[in-house]
Amino acid sequence: MAKFITSRRTVLKGTGAGIAALSTPYFFSKGAWAQDFCNNPTGSTVTIGLNLPLTGTYAEEGADELKAYELAIKHLNGEGDGGLLNVLKPSALKGNGVLGKKVQFVTSDSQTLSDVARAGATRMIERDGAIMITGGSSSGEAIAVQSLCQELGVIFMAGLTHSNDTTGKDKRRYGFRHFFNAYQSGIAIAPVLKEAYGSDRRAYHLTADYTWGWTQEESIKAATEALGWETVATVRTPLGAADYSQYLTPVLNSGADVLILNHYGNDMVNSLTQAVQFGMRDRQANGKQFEVVVPLFSELMAKGAGESIKGIFGTSNWHWNLQDEGSQAFTKSFGAAYGSPPSQAAHTAYVQALLYADACERAGTFYPPEVIKALEGFEFDGMGNGKTLYRAEDHQCMKSVLVVRGNENPTSQFDVLDVVQEVGRDVTTYDPSIFGGELGDAEPVPTCS
């Protein structure tokens, strides 16, 4: 049963008004929402906050996300070719803004740092009146901002975040993730690794020392050990390291025949390039060809790694060369606007903006608890990942996952990845209880002031 929301403003009106309000049926109270939630837009515009790493280790991903958000906002406002508005099914979007209000945005550079991301989100909510926060290319950022948004009653549509914790132990009612997670990477890639490299392997892990790296290591370690692989060592590396020689040298005498790089962004570009320079892909170990695996990487990282990426297996959330209607529509729109194909970071950012706007339209309000209800359990198609479910239990999207490999014979500067396998939603879906956590409540709605 829906609950009546009592704000501080209602109480301050006096005892009589408070009693009257508490005795009013819920359906009469809907009109009072304008005073009951943070940054309710009362004018002709609605503002969303883009919290992006425009500097730091994941800056390249952040820059591509910004392009995608700007494109999504143009399409929501009825500008351009409409992009994925034309193919989202079902859809309540009209191309006239959101609930008739023109969409505008403010930005903050998170610097790929969690505390900076949280401060930036706070500023955009309290100073700029942002009604929704989105973005990020680090799970550390995502978890910090998601927690803040729960505190302030503002919906957070996560950008690129791959840690299991985002929709696991650190999940929040006000946070939603479209991007897949580390556990799903493990499920998807393990059978491919078994077929390519066999069941008798010894793996050495280098892992980014924060929430994403930890859960990525845990997930790929479990998946490979289930194949029969032995884990030789797991070594943590600092985020933003430039020189990996001190971490790579011990691998050579470890008895390992596979190096698994749980790195992302510039960290992955640096560690993979240096591993190749160390001759790891040219050596033999345990009577086998030494191999390198990168469980998660993107087109942007593949381009940055150059020749080193060729033949490397990993997973991706999406790829611009998929032939479904949604992928083709987004690639066409993004390419026309920016002269290059979109990355997976751009794709998830764009889709999150549309999904939030569509939920507001379906709910008929910006009131966060109603928008949350519209997102929870929503099943949609046409966004490039097949039929997708925004699962109510943990706010994690259930959809297909791609296993990719660095292209051995690229035909252009953008043709850097081959899609080896598209692993369906029936395979990548898992029990949401395995990662714990509590979503918390949508009501009563916190206030910004």
Image (cartoon, rainbow, N blue to C red):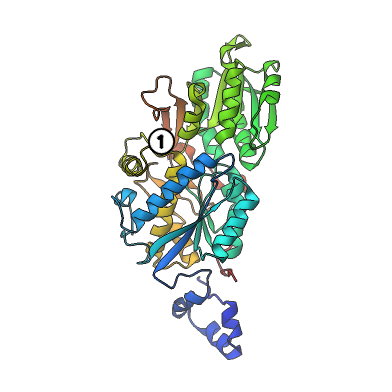
Q: Which class describes the residues within 10 Å of circle 1: few (<14), some (14-19), or many (20+)?
A: many
- Res. 266 in view: yes
Left or right of residue 389: residue 439: right
Where residue 251 appears, x then y in whole percent? 68, 20
Picture quarter with the C terminus: bottom right
Name the residue: 43% across, 40% down.
425
Amino acid under label 1? Answer: His
Where residue 42 appears, x then y in whole percent? 44, 73
Q: Where does label 1 land, which residue? A: 319
- Res. 379 in view: no
403 lies above or below 172: above
Where residue 109 appears, x then y in whole percent? 56, 50
Left or right of residue 1: residue 87: left
Number of numbered callouts drawn: 1
Where residue 360 appears, x then y in whole percent? 41, 63
Nearer the observer, 339 or 422: 339
Q: Which image quarter: residue 124?
A: bottom right
109 lies above or below 313: below
Nearer the observer, 378 or 410: 410
**Circle 1 SS class:** loop
Name of the residue lying farthest toward the bottom: 16
Left or right of residue 98: residue 8: right
Name the residue: 68% across, 36% down.
238
Name the residue: 37% across, 66% down.
99
